[in-house]
Amino acid sequence: MSFNLATILTETTLAAPDAPVCRLGGTTTSYRELDEQSGRLAAGLQAAGLAAGQVLAVQLPNLPQFLIAYFGALKAGLVVLPLNPLLMAPELEYHLGDSAAALLIGSEGMHAEAVKACEPTGVPLYLVSMGPGPLPGGARPFSELFGAAPLDEPGGIPRAPDDTAVLVYTSGTTGRPKGAELTHFQLYMNSTIAGCSACAATTWCWRCCRSSMCAGCRR
């Protein structure tokens, strides 16, 4: 059986395409827009030569681009490595090296430590730009990673349910941080068993929660 966690985005888009998925500074992003943009990113990541199972590190604050990067990486069959934007260069260097990250997506204005960490590791750095100015040496714009059209597979490249979807590092309280592997199916169950995303209903079934919305809210 094949399965990709990004299916929850695609199916919710089919159920409620114009519903808001996030709001920032007066700008609203719909499920349709997130699905389309993450699909284009997935296609671009494939075109850039990233293969299923490779790790894509994401060091972003609470921005819509985090959602795009998260679901785009999943659709491309990659493993998402979320990183705290406040990590210092030695910590970032460790995480990037230990996970064998293929590239890092960061944010302009919070990139100084990322630049320091990417230089010795050789990990390409792509930054979400906040203005028209030039990016720091060696960094490339996040927009370069987008393909002209979304990935052919709307729900993402098929993966096994027990394939790793997200890699989260521990705090390293008793030693060096260790990567905890979260599978596609584990995260799917975590997002659906909590109930309907629209009305917070606590009862659920496979039929209703395939789109993360209950039958009542999908009508």
Image (cartoon, grey):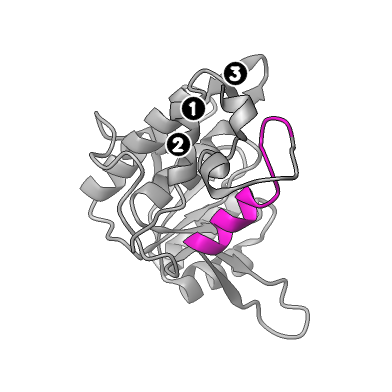
Residue at the disc numbered 2 = 11
Say left or right for 10 vs 67. Answer: left
Find out whether residue 5 is within the magenta segment. Answer: no
Q: Quick one: which residue is furthest to the top in this view?
A: 26
Dividing the picture into quarters, in which one does residue 95 lie? Answer: bottom right
Circle 1 residues within 10 Å: few <14, some 14–19, many ≥20: some
Instruction: From the top left corner, tell me how far across and down residue 3 is, in percent.
Output: 38, 57
Decide whether residue 195 is among the magenta residues: yes
Q: Nearer the viewer, mark 2 or mark 3?
A: 2
Residue name at image x 60 percent, y 65 percent? 168
> Which residue is at 36% across, 43% downward?
155
Is the Cβ of the residue at disc 2 closer than 8 Å to that at disc 3? no
What label sits on residue 25 in the rendered view? none
| Quarter holding residue 87 | bottom right
Task: Find disc 3 in the rendering and name its residue.
Answer: 28
Residue position marked by numbered label 1 in the rendering: 15
Residue 145 is left or right of residue 47, and the answer is: right
Alpha carbons under labels 2 and 3: distance apart: 20 Å
**In the rendered structure, which amino acid carries the disc numbered 1?**
Ala
Q: Is residue 129 left or right of residue 45?
A: right
Mark 2 and 1 residues: CB-CB less than 8 Å, in contact? yes
Q: Is residue 101 left or right of residue 130?
A: left
Say above or below: 63 vs 162.
above
